[in-house]
Image: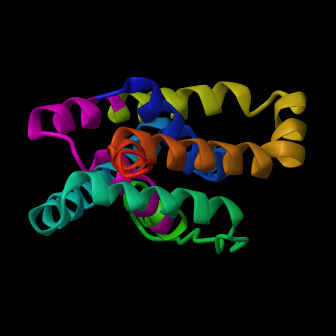
Amino acid sequence: MHYGILLLTFLSVNLDFFFMLIFLLRRYPVIKVVWGYLLGNWVLLILSYLLGKALLLVLPEWLLGILGFLPIYMAFHDEDDADGHKTSRSPVWSVLVTYLSVCSGCNLAIFLPVLVGETLPHFMLALGFISLLTVGAVLLVKGVAQVPAVETLMAQRGEQLMKLCYVLIGLYVFWDSGLISHLFGYLP
């Protein structure tokens, strides 16, 4: 498990949600936002892992390296996320539903190729690491939300930074899965 790639993946798929966190943190207590965000990440990570394991039953890992095209596609596909902010009685439920509606497609497309070859113990470590990043992200966004320079940078360059991260993750998946070495093994 490469923690740098997990960090880059987490940041890139959640970059747009960090803006939503600013609004959610103004509306709900920090602990409720943390729990809703954690539950959303757990649901999507577990789904990504299980889908990857199902694919590995029928395809070799190097071939699943083709999934690296998913994050690259996401980088160049201009589909704006709908504002998934929903209201309900429970702040945790509101944050969870908001996260799932805003980030499901990206998280599944990006985390599936990253987690596809991991063993269960490595996946559990990854889940713990992402959980720590989730809590840290909420606390960091809470503290940084008031800094005008950060808000300006994210508004001006956030989209480009997110796309760059997606491309880097896709290229890493090509390399890590063995796809590149497998394909270059056939070249004269």
Q: Which residues are magenta?
A: 105-129
Which quadrant would residue 175 be assigned to in this image?
top left
On whether residue 130 falls in the magenta region, the answer is: no
Residue 92 location (% of width, % of height) = 38, 54
Q: Nearer the viewer, residue 4 or 175?
A: 175
Residue 146 location (% of width, % of height) = 79, 30
Q: Is residue 169 left or right of residue 61?
A: right
Q: Is residue 86 above or below residue 182?
A: below
Residue at the spot x=66%, y=25% of the render? 143
Which quadrant would residue 83 be assigned to in this image?
bottom right
Q: Is residue 148 left or right of residue 56?
A: right
Q: Nearer the viewer, residue 41 or 31?
A: 41
Residue at the spot x=15%, y=58% of the render? 53
Residue at the spot x=58%, y=71% of the render? 84
Q: Nearer the viewer, residue 106 or 28?
A: 106
Q: Is residue 23 above or below residue 34?
A: below
On whether residue 108 falls in the magenta region, the answer is: yes
Residue 7 location (% of width, % of height) = 48, 31
Q: Is residue 76 visible?
A: yes
Q: Is residue 101 left or right of residue 72?
A: left
Q: Quadrant of the N terminus?
A: top left
Q: Is residue 95 visible?
A: no
Residue at the spot x=44%, y=47% of the render? 188
| Secondary structure, magenta segment, majority class | helix
Residue 127 location (% of width, % of height) = 26, 37
